């Protein structure tokens, strides 16, 4: 089997050691790193996303695929960064203030990374100030906010308000997610959009960036 | 109960409806409902965060939470089990405190400085998360013990509410009878999910320590109460907002056996069992029924596949549902008429033939306006009559 196809299959099955070995082999065969990413890893990840969305696989399998991408990227990233190939986009992500839940946010972070984004993950219980300072400094294309509880989603509002106050709102797209979030909540606080799960989040952001 | 005119007026609607509808004790009503019989009105349970309890007490002029529950017509009273008499929970210099399983916890405050300030006790560090092998995990020495509890007062605690109310042995949110939740606390959510794929022996080892504890603990609780618990509640969150968190096959592989064991133990003592899980658990329901589960709790309406009308049609003959009221959108963000419409829909869909206890799908959260809490309880009484 073509090695890129094998990488795709290994991501799909969440075999992260195999993904790493195959990625190294592909690099040794002088396959361009961007091809390994786009024609191997991301192909696998997209299939994983579809299976997750139609409830054929669940959190453990999605995590395994995310971890597999992470392993492969430890090999690819240094090379991609040295080349002139820019990342697909820049994303800053975190769980909002007062909320320490990160399983969903971590998966989203991994999947965006795996899809070729440069991701800055600010972690959990992140203040509006820190989000906005980071937006100002890093100039990401997208800011992604996560929460689990309904009272903590109110902290998303604070981030939106501060972005406006600091005249940064028009410089960054904002996507929000987490159990109590839906499109109506995104509309209510003036976020650009919401995604119910990591794969659809990647699709939405790709659409915004015209990719 | 405060008798000022303003409070009397605020209580009038619920008092009037209750006087019209109610013909039996709360306990009779609740147990009839669980047995799929139609009592005088649909049984009501209540889950609220403490801040909403306080706000609602103040609104209706109630001097205690028990007084509030009495006024609202809540048919159930929670029993939190025996008293903890084990070693005091270790406090660390960083402010964290170890729980029953040796998991470091911290209080996390949300909405600081706003009208919605509240707090939750959250995991600060999972002690088994960084361990690589089963051998390392086997050396862990902080597994909970059933000897750390004094079972002598739990019967009297339940009897306080009898014969008027239906007593649910709920345990505590953080150490309610379960399998997966303590595993998540001990090993970290991400790691235990990865273990389920990669390290089944680690999953089984941790799980079995948890099961051993709860099996012994529950036998002792049920013996000690001598029939004074009406319903036993256990819980494990396996549902997410848009689907289950794990596959049905994986649940069957790791969790189904002890799920049934826990139910069988309660049934040995003649106690019906309620199981809590947030989120979409629809595809597990046939297995829950097969294991003998009596009541499925939460029925989170904004999760996929959890529409109460469809669940009632498909499974209503074989299982009782508790919950169904949305705390994520309608209660915090909707208008009182939306709240009433939601309650009416659930009651119209699920009350027929008994087997439905109305309640919120989780605690009413701090961001819920008081007028929506009032509308909710008024609607329970307006539309709950048989």
Image (tube, coloured by chain):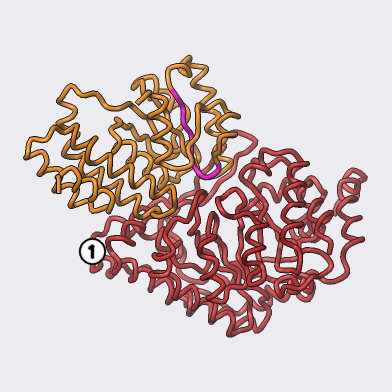
Chain colours: A orange, B red
B24, A123: nearer the viewer: B24
Q: Position of residue A104 (x, y in %)?
A: 42, 45
> Count of labels shown?
1
State which quarter of the image contains the C terminus of chain B. Answer: bottom right
Relative to A3, B74 lies left or right: right
**Residue B105 visible here:** yes
Residue sitting at x 69%, y 47%: B52
Q: Where is residue B49? Give x, y as percent.
A: 64, 51
Q: Is residue A175 magenta?
A: yes
Q: Residue at x 40, y 23 (%)?
A: A133
Whether residue B28 appears in magenta in the rendering, the answer is no
Q: Secondary structure at mark 1?
A: loop
Closest to the observer: A11 or B240?
A11
State whether residue B205 is above or below residue B267.
above
Residue B80 in view, yes or no = no
Residue at point 51%, 22% (across, down): A162
x, y percentage for residue B20? 92, 61
Tag 1 subunit: B
Drawn side of residue B25 relative to residue A166, left or right = right
Graded by Cα atoms within 10 Å as few (under 14), some (14 to 19) or many (20 or more), the crowding at tag 1 reads: few
Query: Residue most toward the top?
Result: A167
Residue at 72% over, 76% down: B159
Which contiguous range is marked in magenta? A173-180
* Quadrant of image for the N terminus of chain B: bottom right
In the image, farthest residue toward the front: A1
Side of B144 where A61 appears, left or right:
left
Compare residues B382 and B142 and report the one nearer the observer.
B382
Left or right of residue A64: residue A4? left
Q: Quadrant of residue B370?
A: top right
Where residue B245 appears, as percent x and y from the top left, is 44, 55
Query: What residue is pinned by disc 1?
Result: B133
């Amino acid at each position: 089997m073509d090695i890129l196809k094998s990488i795709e299959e290994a991501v799909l099955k969440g075999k992260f050691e195999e993904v790493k070995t195959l990625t190294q082999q592909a690099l040794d065969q002088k396959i361009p790193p961007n091809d390994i990413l786009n024609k191997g890893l991301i192909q696998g990840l997209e299939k994983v996303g579809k299976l997750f969305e139609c409830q054929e696989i669940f959190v453990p399998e999605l995590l395994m695929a995310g971890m597999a991408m992470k392993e492969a990227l430890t090999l690819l990233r240094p090379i991609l960064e040295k080349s002139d190939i820019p990342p697909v986009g820049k994303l800053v992500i975190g769980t909002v203030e007062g909320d320490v839940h990160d399983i969903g946010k971590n998966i989203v972070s991994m999947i965006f990374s795996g899809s070729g984004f440069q991701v800055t993950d600010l972690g959990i219980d992140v203040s509006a100030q820190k989000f906005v300072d980071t937006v100002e400094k890093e100039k990401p294309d997208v800011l992604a906010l996560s929460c689990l509880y309904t009272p903590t989603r109110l902290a998303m509002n604070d981030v939106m308000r501060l972005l406006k106050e600091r005249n940064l709102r028009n410089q960054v797209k904002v996507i929000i997610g987490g159990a109590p979030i839906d499109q109506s909540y995104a509309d209510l606080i003036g976020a650009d959009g919401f995604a119910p799960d990591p794969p659809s989040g990647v699709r939405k952001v790709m659409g915004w960036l015209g990719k | 109960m405060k008798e000022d005119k303003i409070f009397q007026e605020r209580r009038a609607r619920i008092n009037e409806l209750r006087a019209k509808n109610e013909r039996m004790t709360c306990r009779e009503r609740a147990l009839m409902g669980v047995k799929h019989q139609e009592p005088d009105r649909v049984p009501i349970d209540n889950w609220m965060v403490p801040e909403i309890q306080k706000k609602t007490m103040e609104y209706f002029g109630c001097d205690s939470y028990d007084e509030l529950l009495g006024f609202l017509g809540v048919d159930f009273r929670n029993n939190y089990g025996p008293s903890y008499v084990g070693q005091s929970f270790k406090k660390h210099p960083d402010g964290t405190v170890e729980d029953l399983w040796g998991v470091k916890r911290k209080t996390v405050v949300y909405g600081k400085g706003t009208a919605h300030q509240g707090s939750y006790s959250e995991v600060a560090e999972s002690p088994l998360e960084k361990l690589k092998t089963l051998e390392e995990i086997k050396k862990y020495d902080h597994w909970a013990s059933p000897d750390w509890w004094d079972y002598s007062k739990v019967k009297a605690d339940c009897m306080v509410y009898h014969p008027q109310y239906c007593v649910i042995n709920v345990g505590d949110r953080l150490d309610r009878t379960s399998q997966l939740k303590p595993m998540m606390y001990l090993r970290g959510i991400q790691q235990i999910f990865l273990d389920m794929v990669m390290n089944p022996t680690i999953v089984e080892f941790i799980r079995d320590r948890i099961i051993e504890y709860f099996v012994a603990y529950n036998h002792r609780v049920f013996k000690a109460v001598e029939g004074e618990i009406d319903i036993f509640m256990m819980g494990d969150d396996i549902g997410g907002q848009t689907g289950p968190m794990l596959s049905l096959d994986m649940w069957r592989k790791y969790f189904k056996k002890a799920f049934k064991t826990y139910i069988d133990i309660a049934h040995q003592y003649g106690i019906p069992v309620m199981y809590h899980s947030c989120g979409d658990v629809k595809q597990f329901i046939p297995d829950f029924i097969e294991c003998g589960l009596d009541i499925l709790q939460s029925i989170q309406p904004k999760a996929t596949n959890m529409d109460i009308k469809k669940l009632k049609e498909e499974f209503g003959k074989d299982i009782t549902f508790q919950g169904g009221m949305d705390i994520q959108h309608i209660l915090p963000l909707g208008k009182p008429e939306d709240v009433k419409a939601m309650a009416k829909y659930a009651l119209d869909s699920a009350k027929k033939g008994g087997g439905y206890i109305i309640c919120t799908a989780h605690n009413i959260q701090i961001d819920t306006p008081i007028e929506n809490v009032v509308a909710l309880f008024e609607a329970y009484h307006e539309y709950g009559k048989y």
